[in-house]
């Protein structure tokens, strides 16, 4: 019974997919290449870990995002793109750029959560370099503090075309 209620909730929610610009050629190429799957390397650039809790919940039996072909990869070299959480701290700016450099092209960059989009509650903090788009090009932004798993799944499914 709970599963049906969850399915209804997932269908009813609006898609929280906010392209940072019009849908990029990279997104189209990745969707075409993958034919319905999406492998992402997660980078915590300075999050409070709230976004990670929601990200991790996607893989629980309740949401089971892997049934949609969406997985996290340990290495950027095997990934279709990056999913980045938190504002980018000064110490994480260079590692984030290097991780993107190690990701095969074409690839997508997802900014997950309000901090990743515009630094959120950490705006103007002394250790913050900027939003994710200040450091690397961003294709998709998912708003929320933090975004809930169903919202993240809907956005990633739209990206994966599943
Ligand atoms: S968006 Fe909210 S939950 Fe996510 S890292 Fe920022 S403060 Fe934490």
Image (tube, rainbow, N blue to C red):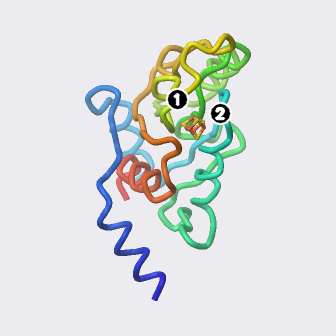
Q: Quadrant of the N terminus?
A: bottom left
* SS under mark 2: loop
* SS under mark 1: helix
Q: How many marks?
A: 2
Residue 119: image x %, image y %?
A: 52, 23
Left or right side of 48 for 34 = left
What residue sits 59% from the left and 44% below the top?
51
Query: Alpha carbon of mark 1 to alpha carbon of mark 2: how far?
Result: 8 Å
What residue sits 50% from the left and 38% below the top?
113
Task: Specify the quarter for ligand 1.
Answer: top right
What residue sits 52% from the left and 20% below the top?
131
Near mark 2 (Cα within 10 A), the count class, few <14, some 14-19 or many ≥20, is: many
- Mark 1 or mark 2: whose residue is earlier in sequence: 2
What residue sits 35% from the left and 51% below the top?
158
From this viewpoint, which residue is outermost toward the bottom? 1
Looking at mark 2, is its residue's CB closer than 8 Å to ligand 1? yes
Question: Residue 127, which numbered label?
Answer: none
Q: Quadrant of residue 36?
A: bottom left
Residues 1 and 162: in front is: 1
Near mark 1 (Cα within 10 A), the count class, few <14, some 14-19 or many ≥20, is: many
Q: Are marks 1 and 2 in contact (CB under 8 Å)?
A: yes
Q: Quadrant of residue 4?
A: bottom left
Looking at mark 1, is its residue's CB closer than 8 Å to ligand 1? yes
> Circle 2 is placed at which residue position?
47
Question: Residue 116, which numbered label?
Answer: 1
Q: Quadrant of the C terminus?
A: bottom left
Residues 135 and 26: in front is: 135
User: Where is 49 relative to 119, above or below?
Assistant: below
Residue 58: image x %, image y %?
A: 57, 59
Left or right side of 119 for 25 = left
Residue 53: image x %, image y %?
A: 65, 51
Residue 32: image x %, image y %?
A: 36, 46
């Amino acid at each position: 019974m709970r599963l049906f209620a969850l399915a209804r909730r997932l269908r009813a929610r609006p898609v929280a997919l906010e392209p940072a610009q019009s849908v990029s050629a990279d997104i189209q190429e990745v969707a075409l290449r993958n034919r319905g799957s999406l492998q992402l390397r997660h980078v915590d650039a300075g999050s409070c870990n709230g976004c990670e809790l929601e990200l991790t919940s996607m893989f629980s039996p309740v949401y089971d995002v892997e049934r949609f072909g969406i997985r996290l990869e340990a290495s950027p070299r095997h990934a279709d793109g990056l999913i980045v959480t938190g504002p980018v701290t000064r110490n994480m700016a260079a590692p984030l750029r290097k991780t993107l450099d190690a990701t095969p092209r074409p690839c997508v960059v997802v900014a997950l959560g309000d901090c990743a989009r515009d630094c959120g509650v950490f705006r103007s903090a002394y250790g913050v370099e900027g939003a994710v788009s200040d450091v690397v090009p961003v294709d998709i932004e998912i708003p929320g503090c933090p975004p809930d798993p169903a919202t993240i799944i809907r956005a990633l499914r739209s990206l994966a075309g599943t």
